[in-house]
Image (cartoon, rainbow, N blue to C red):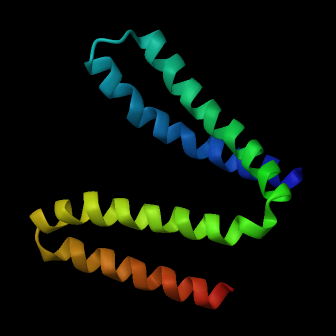
Amino acid sequence: MAGAIAVSGGIALQNIPEGMVVIPPMLAAGIGRGRAFLLALFTGAMEVLGTFLGYRAVTFFTGILPLSLAFAGGAMIYVIADEMMPMTKEQGKAGVYVFSLGVCVMILLNSALS
């Protein structure tokens, strides 16, 4: 349970800047400040709750964890390739090169740390 608390604490800290990014579009859409704050707070709280549920699910389904993580990683790569790569191409080839360099660094870190 201590691991779940540590992970949820990290996610909660990550949600602070995420909430700051989510609120301005809601304000621009005409949603009141209090309601925008509560909606951002609610979405952040759901992520923390999901961390606890996910931690519990892993203890019951350890056999499918590698497959689940591979699926999640593949989905993230697909979103990046489908949504973000075309945007970087519009800015020139530098964005594509930096993205490729980042992928290479992550592969090296994964190999070195595992």
Q: Is residue 81 above or below residue 7?
A: below
Most foreground residue, 113 or 43: 43
The quadrant in which residue 89 appears is bottom left
Q: Position of residue 72 (x, y in %)?
A: 54, 62
Residue 99 higher or lower than 55, as above or below: below
Residue nearest the observer in this picture, 72 or 48: 72
In the rendered picture of this protein, how many numbered marks are placed on residues?
0
Residue at (32% x, 80% y) in the render: 100
The reply to whether residue 29 is visible in this rendering is: yes
Left or right of 53 in this view: 69: left
Which quadrant is the C terminus positioned in? bottom right
- The x and y percentages for residue 73 are 51, 67
In the rendered view, does 94 fall on the left or right side of 99? left
Q: Position of residue 41 (x, y in %)?
A: 57, 25
Locate residue 20: give its quadrant. top left
Residue at the image point whose x is 39% and y is 36% from the top: 21
When the figure is inspected, residue 7 is found, relative to residue 72, above or below; the finding is above
- Residue 51 rendering spot, x and y as whole percentages: 70, 46
Judged left or right of residue 66, residue 40 is: left
Q: Is residue 91 visible?
A: no
Q: Residue at x 44, y 18 (%)?
A: 36
Residue, far right = 1
Tell me the residue at 29%/76% (across/down). 98
